[in-house]
Each structure stands twice: as structure tokens, then as C-alpha cells.
């Protein structure tokens, strides 16, 4: 029997709509509110394969059936407290929200737009598939929310990125016919997330489908025009409203006969097809039929042949800076396809792919290598996370349960008989956490203060 939570009174108009949508399944849908929301993590396959992560994982994990790298975990495990989280081995994400990036089927070398990215979970999934190749433009209208996106991408070790804070509609003209793949997880009324986040009920009551549907149509139209021939768009929402889902697709397809709906790359018995003629290949996620929240996901293909972006094999020249030049003697990461740029007192490794830039609000271009002061170079936290253990010649690695691991994450000085001086890459079980300055048996903590686990 469904029991209304006193803090979550569902609006009567919403209940009426859901009764019409679910019919005989309406009571089952209501009963899903008595089931706790599900928790999952997504493995960063650019750092570790899903199979290898399962071998070292201390958590009780079961696969999420609509992605190759997602796993449910028990809430009492709390993986955000584990050192592997700080090493960027996974991202904690609502399981249904894993589907859009999985359905996009990103390949190495793709040029990808995540149009409404914050807080970055889907961008992290795209970045892990690109694995340092191609380009990801991770954009969101809210520049302030993009700080979280950048932090998540840095933790994942992403280097081939531009993190921007633009209205996606303003990208249409400069980026026309530019992207191989586009992910549009559109702003919506959020009906599918009421169980997980009851606070969304209030915003639903003030801004429903009549507010969001016109915006969604504009955004999808812009994305179609930014897509190359042969490219793919995943359009998704976390709402049930047909006006925000199938009707948005019908609208754009009526103007673009070159578009076709593709079948989902994953098949699962808990999926429900889209409603209306020709919408059967869309996927509706219903919380009473699967272990996740409510979502809608569709895959649009643009007719034509997708031509790959030529990849640069040139290695960038090292900027004329004594400290940076000396530091790079210890780095074995291949920066082919990037160029080093000085911007004020910082050095960046920027993807060497031509961009049709207009003036944009850019939070990050490429990988922040570090900062300079006169002849001194100090490597960044982002660089530490982008390196593999074998790509730096001075490293130290501790087990996850070694007390020194947590001391390092708290910003404390640690002691280890490494025999190494200068910059040392500190790792947990071989996966980087950050830098320290070695002197004898002392490792002076250089973990970025904003990354420390208090």
C-alpha cells in the first residue's frame, strides 16, 4: 500500500496525469515511492577497466543493465568516502541517468558536445570513452554550476576538454555542422525524479511542461544544426510528459527529414517504448519497472557519412620556461595532438583541434599543467589526476587501508622511505591522488587544499 510521505505531497494534477499515463499500472507506480532510491557508480574506464575495478573494489556491486561500466552499490558502502573515489576511479550517479551517455556510443576521436552538462556526470562518461582523444565541449548555461563539472572532469583525468558557460542556443551559428555526437539532456519539469528529490515538486508546480517544451524544441533544433552529417544526438529528459519528450522529437523531425530514430544500443526487459506512432524506439524508464528513476532517452541519427576528424601526431614544443622544461623531463605522457599555451601565470595543454570560436565564457581550455612564478613551476592537481603512475618517474603508492593514504588526503605530511627528492606523484594502489615534495623520508603534502578530505 502506498503511503504519502508528509514531506512529499504529490500534486493532484500530477496524479491525474500519471493515472492516465500508467492506467492499470498506476498503483504500482505509486508503490514505487515506498522503495528507496537506488545508488550506483560509474567506473572511469580511461583509468581502469570495469573488470579490473571489480577485482579491487571493496563494495558489493551488481551491474546496471543499460551500461557496460555502471554498478549498483549498497548505501551503507558510501563510496565517496573511499580513496578510490579521490583517485577518480568512478563517479557516483543515479542509475537511470547513466543511460544517455551510454546510448550516445562515443568512440575515441569523436568531437562531442554535452549541451547542458552541469554537474558533469554525463560529461565524465563521455570523457572516459574519449580517453584523451578527440574533443569534448562540456557546456551549461549556468557558469557557476560548471565549477562542479570542471572538478569532476579533472578528477576523471580529462584533458581534451573545453568547459564553457554559454546558452546552447548561442552555439548554433559558430558550431554549425561541427560535432560528431551531441548529448542534450534537456532541462525539464523533473517528474521522474520526485522520489529521489522531492524538492523538485515545488519547481514543477511553478514551471511545468508548458514552460519547458518550447525551450526543449529550440535546444534540439540548435543541436541538429550543430551536428555533422552522419552524426548522432541523444535527446533525454528526466520527466514523463509526452509534451517534453515525444512531441519535441516529432516537432524537430517534421522540419528535418534527414533525421531518423535509432534503436537503443542496450535492450532490457524493464524498458518501455515511446508513445505515439514512430516513437517505439525511444526508451521510457519507469521506477516501478526497473531499478532507477524516471527518464526518457532517444537516439537521433542524421543521414550522411560521418567523416573522422584528422588527428594531429605532432608533439608540442615545450614553452621556454626553465622550471617547466626541467619538470617535463620527468613526465612520459604523450601530448601529441595538444599544444602548450601560456595564459598569464599558467601553462595549459590545449587540444590542437580547430575551433570556430566566437567570444565564449570558458572556464577551462584543455588541461591545466601548472603555475609559474619566475623560474619555478608548480604542477597542478589536474595534471596529477591526468597522469598514470608509469607516466611519471618519481612515485610512491600506498594501499587503500594504509593510514598514510588518508593522511595524505587530509593534507598532512607523510613519511615513506622512497629515497626520492623533488616532485613525487602519490598514488593509492597505483592510481594517482596528487603531488608531494620529497626530501629524504619526508613527503611534504602538495594536494590542492580544495581537494583535501577533511
Image (cartoon, rainbow, N blue to C red):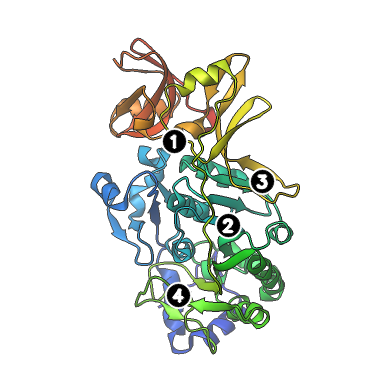
Q: Upstream in the sequence, badge 2 or badge 4? A: 2
Q: Position of residue 277 (x, y in %)?
A: 54, 90
Q: Is mark 2 on a helix, strand or loop?
A: strand
Precedes in sequence: disc 2 or disc 1: 2
Query: Residue at 41% across / 77% down in the picture?
Result: 271
Crowd class of label 4 (few under 14; some 14 to 19; many from 20; radius 10 Å): many
Question: Eyeballing the image, is 37 above or below 141?
Answer: below
Closer to the N terminus: mark 4 or mark 3?
A: 3
Q: Mark 2 points at which residue?
A: 114
- Circle nearer the N terminus (3, 1): 3
**Residue receiving disc 1:** 334
SS for callout 4: loop
Label 4 sits on residue: 286
Q: Is mark 3 on a helix, strand or loop?
A: loop
Q: In this view, does 54 lie to the left or right of 209?
A: left
> Circle 3 is placed at which residue position?
144
- Is the Cβ of the residue at disc 4 closer than 8 Å to that at disc 3? no
> In which quarter of the view is residue 245 placed?
bottom right
Residue 454 shows up from this direction: no
Amino acid at each position: 500500500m502506498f503511503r504519502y510521505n508528509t514531506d512529499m505531497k504529490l500534486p493532484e494534477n500530477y496524479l491525474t496525469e500519471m493515472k492516465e499515463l500508467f492506467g492499470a499500472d498506476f498503483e504500482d507506480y505509486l508503490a514505487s515511492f515506498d522503495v528507496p532510491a537506488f545508488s550506483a557508480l560509474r567506473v572511469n574506464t580511461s583509468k581502469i577497466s570495469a573488470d579490473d575495478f571489480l577485482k579491487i573494489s571493496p563494495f558489493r556491486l551488481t551491474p546496471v543493465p543499460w551500461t557496460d561500466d555502471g554498478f549498483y552499490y549498497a548505501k551503507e558502502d558510501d563510496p565517496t568516502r573511499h580513496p578510490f573515489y579521490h583517485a577518480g576511479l568512478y563517479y557516483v550517479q543515479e542509475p537511470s541517468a547513466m543511460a544517455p551517455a551510454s546510448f550516445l556510443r562515443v568512440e575515441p576521436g569523436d568531437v562531442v558536445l554535452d549541451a547542458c552538462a552541469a554537474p558533469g556526470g554525463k560529461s565524465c562518461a563521455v570523457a572516459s570513452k574519449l580517453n584523451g582523444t578527440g574533443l569534448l565541449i562540456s557546456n551549461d548555461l549556468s557558469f557557476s554550476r560548471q565549477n562542479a563539472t570542471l572538478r569532476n572532469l579533472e578528477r576523471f583525468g580529462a584533458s581534451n576538454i573545453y568547459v564553457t558557460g554559454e546558452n546552447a542556443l548561442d552555439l548554433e551559428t559558430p558550431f554549425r555542422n561541427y560535432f560528431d555526437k551531441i548529448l542534450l539532456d534537456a532541462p525539464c519539469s523533473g517528474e521522474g525524479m520526485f522520489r529521489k528529490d522531492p524538492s523538485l515538486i515545488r519547481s514543477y508546480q511553478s514551471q511545468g511542461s508548458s514552460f519547458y517544451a518550447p525551450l526543449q524544441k529550440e535546444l534540439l533544433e540548435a543541436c541538429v544544426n550543430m551536428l555533422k552529417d552522419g552524426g548522432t544526438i541523444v535527446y533525454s529528459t528526466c520527466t514523463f510528459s509526452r509534451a517534453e519528450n515525444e512531441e519535441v522529437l516529432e516537432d524537430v523531425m517534421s522540419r528535418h527529414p534527414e533525421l531518423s530514430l535509432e534503436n537503443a544500443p542496450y535492450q532490457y526487459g524493464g524498458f518501455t517504448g515511446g508513445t505515439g506512432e514512430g516513437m517505439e524506439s525511444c526508451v521510457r524508464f519507469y521506477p516501478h519497472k526497473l531499478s532507477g528513476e524516471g527518464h526518457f532517452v532517444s537516439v537521433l541519427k542524421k543521414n550522411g557519412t560521418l567523416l573522422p576528424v584528422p588527428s594531429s601526431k605532432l608533439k608540442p614544443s615545450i614553452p621556454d620556461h626553465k622550471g617547466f622544461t626541467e619538470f617535463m623531463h620527468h613526465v612520459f605522457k604523450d601530448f601529441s595532438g595538444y599544444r602548450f599555451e601560456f595564459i598569464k601565470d599558467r601553462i595549459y595543454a590545449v587540444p590542437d583541434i580547430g575551433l570556430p570560436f566566437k567570444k565564449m565564457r570558458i572556464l577551462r581550455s584543455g588541461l591545466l599543467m601548472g603555475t609559474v612564478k619566475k623560474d619555478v613551476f608548480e604542477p597542478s592537481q589536474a595534471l596529477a589526476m591526468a597522469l598514470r603512475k608509469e607516466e611519471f618517474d618519481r612515485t610512491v603508492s600506498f594501499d587503500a587501508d594504509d593510514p598514510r593514504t588518508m593522511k595524505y588526503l587530509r593534507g598532512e605530511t607523510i613519511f615513506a622511505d622512497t629515497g626520492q627528492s623533488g616532485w613525487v606523484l602519490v598514488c593509492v594502489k597505483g592510481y594517482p591522488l596528487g603531488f608531494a615534495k620529497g626530501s629524504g623520508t619526508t613527503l611534504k603534502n602538495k594536494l590542492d587544499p580544495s581537494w583535501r578530505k577533511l
